[in-house]
Image (cartoon, rainbow, N blue to C red):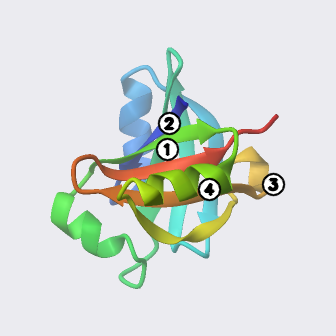
Amino acid sequence: MNVHHVGYLVRDLASAQEEFLRLGFVVKSAAVRDFARGVDICFIENGGYVLELISPIGAESPLHPLLKKIQNSPYHICYEVEDLPGACARFSADGYMLIGSPAPAPAISGGGGVMVCFLFSPQLGILELLQKNN
């Protein structure tokens, strides 16, 4: 498994993006609204390191309570996997808790619907698994 990106939760997407650009990051993708997850997302990159900036859309977003708790902060690591259903099953069997069902990620591949799933580990926190595009 290879790291695809680190998810970074932010209060204001445009302000966070501006600050990261000052640190040498470049915009990898324009902002996308993910209605299913209640967030706005954009990707930025610096030297091969990719951050997914994620900003909840209002208090109804499932990530709004987490933002209140941890403020602006990294909160998940995304890994590419060859077989998403198989990887989800293996991690679940190893004690990871599946957070929802695998679902399309509109911010990845220009809205093409690459499938992802989220898991929680008490030792590691939140992981995202991304179906590798072969």
Disc with the residue nearer the chain's start (2 vs 4): 2
- Asked if the residue under mark 2 is in contact with the one under mark 1, i.e. CB atoms within 8 Å, the reply is yes
Q: Is residue 92 above or below residue 4?
A: below
Determine whether the residue tagged by mark 4 lies in a helix, strand or loop.
strand
Residue extending farthest to the top is: 47
Q: Position of residue 119 (x, y in %)?
A: 43, 59
Determine whether the residue tagged by mark 3 lies in a helix, strand or loop.
loop
Tell me the number on the disc at residue 116: 4
Tell me the number on the disc at residue 52: 1
Residue corresponding to mark 3: 112
Q: Position of residue 27 (x, y in %)?
A: 58, 33
Determine whether the residue tagged by mark 2 lies in a helix, strand or loop.
strand
Residue at image position (42%, 50%) is 127
Residue at image position (58%, 49%) is 87
Dot 2 surroundings within 10 Å: few (below 14), some, or many (20 or more)? many
Distance, label 3 to label 1, CA atoms, is: 17 Å
Tell me the quarter of the picture where residue 65 sits: bottom left
Residue corresponding to mark 2: 5
